[in-house]
Structure formats: C-alpha cells, structure tokens
Image (cartoon, helix red, strand yellow):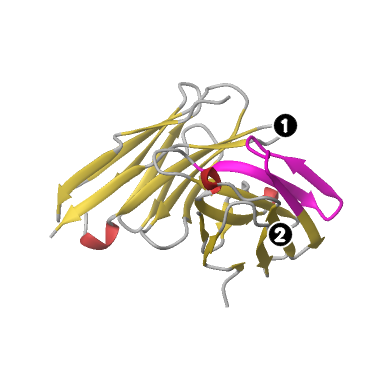
Amino acid sequence: ILNVEQSPQSLHVQEGDSTNFTCSFPSSNFYALHWYRWETAKSPEALFVMTLNGDEKKKGRISATLNTKEGYSYLYIKGSQPEDSATYLCAFRTGGYQKVTFGTGTKLQVIP
Amino acid sequence: DADVTQTPRNRITKTGKRIMLECSQTKGHDRMYWYRQDPGLGLRLIYYSFDVKDINKGEISDGYSVSRQAQAKFSLSLESAIPNQTALYFCATSDPNRGGGYTFGSGTRLTVV
C-alpha cells in the first residue's frame, strides 16, 4: 500500500492570509502528482497535474511545487478568500501500472 | 450537461437489496473508475476499466461488481447491500495522455439501513 500523507488535516486562516499545505508521497516509481479542490457538496475538481521534478504550476492565487526526489509537493494560496474554503486533495500516480493513491486531504476554512 | 454524470445522487436502501449506481461520460475517455469516500479516509478505488473489454479490481472490490456497457457507461452494483457500504461513491474518467488527472462525477450518497 502506497502512503500518501497530507498535512495539516485542517486549517483555519483569516481572509487575506497566505497559507500552504504539504503532500508527501513515495519517491520511487513516480509518474504524476495531482492536486484537487473539493468543495462541500460538490465533486473534486482538478487543480494541477504535475509530472516533472521541479515543476511549478499556478492558477490565479493558487500555486504548487513538486520535488519528486524527496517525495513532496506544496500547495500555496496567496491572500486567501472565503471562496477558497474547501478540502484540497493530492493524489500520487505511479508509473507502469499507474496506480493512483489519494491522500486524506487538507480541509481549509477561510474566515471572513 | 456535466462531463461525468452519476445517478442517483442520493439513495437509501435496505440491507440485502441489490442496487446499481450508474455513470456516463461525454469526455470520450477510455479510462473509467469507481471510488468510495468514507470520513477520515482517502478516496479508495473499487474497480477500474481501461476500455470496454478491460475490467480490473481495485483495492476494495469485495461486495461490488461492475459493468462497462460502452465507452461512455460504467455501472457499479452492490449485489446484496450491507450497512458498511454506506458511503459517498464517485465515478471518474481520466486521459492518460494528459498526466491522468481525473474528472469526477457529482457523487452518489448511498445509505444502507
């Protein structure tokens, strides 16, 4: 069983604060790392698909970095807004058989 | 219309009943998946299909079966529902040529009483 860990489990920040969370994954047999945003009562939506060591992706105020050699990815949110409140999931995809393992998510609440 | 449509959205069923959850997609993807989500656990793979003739068990397939009726349709059945199958179920598709990121359906909340 592949271990994908996300930290922290939950986070409360004030509107306007910047924040970041971590996804840790095995450093071997890497194919891709996905980030998803999951709002309550909706389905997870893909934010980023990252495939190369050193990748940096950005979408508006949200960005992510990837280190496949040490097995971690960071997701950053700059100037958090209440609409950023959601659970952020990462998923690690292996090469070859392409098994995908999801983390349990970081639940972010942005307080107005 | 949504790219991945699941029906029903919510269902309450009794222990021992057979139930089918349906999924259809308009993405044109060959790969389709069924996941379940339980509080405190990550999404766990039940079954996956890489094309119409290819069906594979995931990590928690016991008590479930699937049917891939067409490229666009992938249904999940619980032959004899039990209370610990109460969960949120997601269907998803992916395109391996674009890093394999998933497009999820809206989910089916199933309660077995």
The one nearer the camera, B64 or A25, is B64
Cα distance, mark 2 to mark 1? 26 Å
Mark 2: few, some, or many residues within 10 Å (few <14, many ≥20)? many
Residue B4: percent from left, percent from top: 61, 66
Dot label at residue B75: 2
Chain bearing tag 2 is B
Name the residue beneath numbered marker 1: A96
Residue B102: percent from left, percent from top: 58, 53
Residue B79 relative to residue A13: left or right = right
SS at mark 1? loop
Q: Is residue B47 magenta?
A: yes
Q: Quadrant of the N terminus of chain B?
A: bottom right
SS at mark 2? strand
The answer to whether residue B73 is seen in the rendering is yes
Which residue: 63% across, 37% down? B60
Amino acid carrying mark 2 in the image: Ser
The one nearer the camera, B46 or A22, is B46
